[in-house]
Image (cartoon, rainbow, N blue to C red):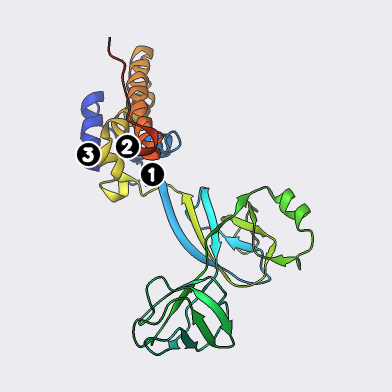
């Protein structure tokens, strides 16, 4: 269901032509309210987003994305991408800088053997666990293991790591709130204060673009019943409809949202291998 099809359907169901101009976008407002209601009722996988950032040493704060609403997970890992040279058949390579390169990091790049891991770091000479598959050259990527941080509150972070100079590998995080540089956006506080440069990977919940501006959305394409019925609830309320109509549209919305919850809060979080197939008892 596209935006135009949704507008037509709502008008036909309600037998009413709604005002929808730049000065008075009544229909668009109802649709956006319906989307917000759905997105806060069901956590479908399409509401998830993934971004990476950088945590710098001596700075225990990490800015949230502009469209951030809530966290699914936050992880950190060490990473480096220097240029390097090496000879095929040897275990060692020479990097331009060994900064942020540590033992047990995975190594990938041109000429690096499959499954290579750092065995030893000696200055700019790096010893790997497998031989070079070819002549090593260009940018080589080093990446450490993912460490998922535990969510706490700011009080815990402040009490557990009272000194800003208590450096170490991050273990905990909390939503700190807006910083003075941008009072409209949130930030994370990390504990302990990072001891080196880390890459951060954030999975978070956000509102996708509305069908009002996008024209088509995942919700309109895959679960138009929920979107239509949620918009009808807003429309009948706008029209100050009779109680029986309000109750009817609410009932239809609850039925469609139950089907969507079955997908978003059920099927998308399980599989038949681990959870078994859904069975209905037959008499």
Q: How many marks?
A: 3
Quick check: 50 above or below 78? above
Question: In front of the other: label 3 or label 1?
Answer: 1
Question: In front of the other: label 3 or label 2?
Answer: 3
Q: Residue furthest top?
A: 283
Q: Earlier in the sequence, mark 2 or mark 1?
A: 2
Label 2–label 1 contact, CB within 8 A: no
Dividing the picture into quarters, in which one does residue 181 lie?
bottom right
Label 3–label 1 contact, CB within 8 A: no
Compared across the picture, whether 39 is left or right of 104 comes to left
Q: Residues within 10 Å of mark 2 (few under 14, many from 20)?
A: many
Would you name the residue on which mark 1 appears?
Answer: 45
The disc label shown at residue 183, or none: none
Q: Position of residue 111 (x, y in %)?
A: 36, 82
Compared across the picture, whether 144 is left or right of 22 comes to right
| Alpha carbon distance from label 3 to label 1 | 20 Å
Q: Position of residue 143 (x, y in %)?
A: 49, 70
The disc label shown at residue 1, or none: 3
The disc label shown at residue 27, or none: 2
């Amino acid at each position: 269901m596209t935006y135009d099809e949704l507008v037509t359907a709502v008008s036909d169901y309600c037998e009413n032509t709604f005002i929808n101009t730049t000065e008075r976008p009544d229909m668009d407002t109802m649709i956006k309210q319906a989307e917000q209601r759905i997105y806060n009722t069901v956590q479908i996988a399409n509401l998830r987003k993934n971004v990476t950032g950088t945590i710098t040493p001596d700075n225990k704060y990490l800015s949230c994305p502009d469209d951030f609403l809530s966290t699914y997970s936050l992880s950190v890992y060490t990473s480096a991408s220097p240029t390097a040279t090496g000879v095929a058949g040897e275990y060692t390579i020479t990097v331009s800088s060994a900064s942020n390169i540590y033992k047990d990091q995975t190594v990938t790049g041109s000429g690096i053997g499959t499954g290579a891991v750092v065995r030893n770091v000696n200055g700019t000479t790096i010893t790997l666990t497998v031989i070079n598959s070819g002549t090593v050259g260009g940018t080589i990527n080093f990446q450490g293991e993912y460490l998922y941080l535990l969510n706490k509150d700011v009080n815990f972070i402040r009490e557990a790591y009272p000194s800003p100079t208590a450096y170490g590998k991050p273990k905990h995080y909390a939503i700190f709130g807006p910083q003075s540089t941008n009072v409209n956006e949130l930030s994370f506080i990390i504990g302990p204060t990072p001891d080196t440069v880390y890459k951060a990977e954030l999975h978070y919940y956000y509102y996708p673009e509305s069908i009002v501006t996008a024209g088509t959305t995942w919700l309109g394409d895959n679960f138009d019943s929920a979107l239509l019925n949620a918009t009808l609830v807003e429309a009948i309320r706008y029209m100050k409809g009779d109680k029986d109509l309000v109750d009817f549209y609410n009932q239809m919305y609850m039925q469609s949202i139950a089907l969507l919850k079955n997908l978003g809060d059920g099927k998308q979080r399980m599989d038949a291998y681990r959870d078994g197939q859904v069975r209905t008892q037959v008499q």
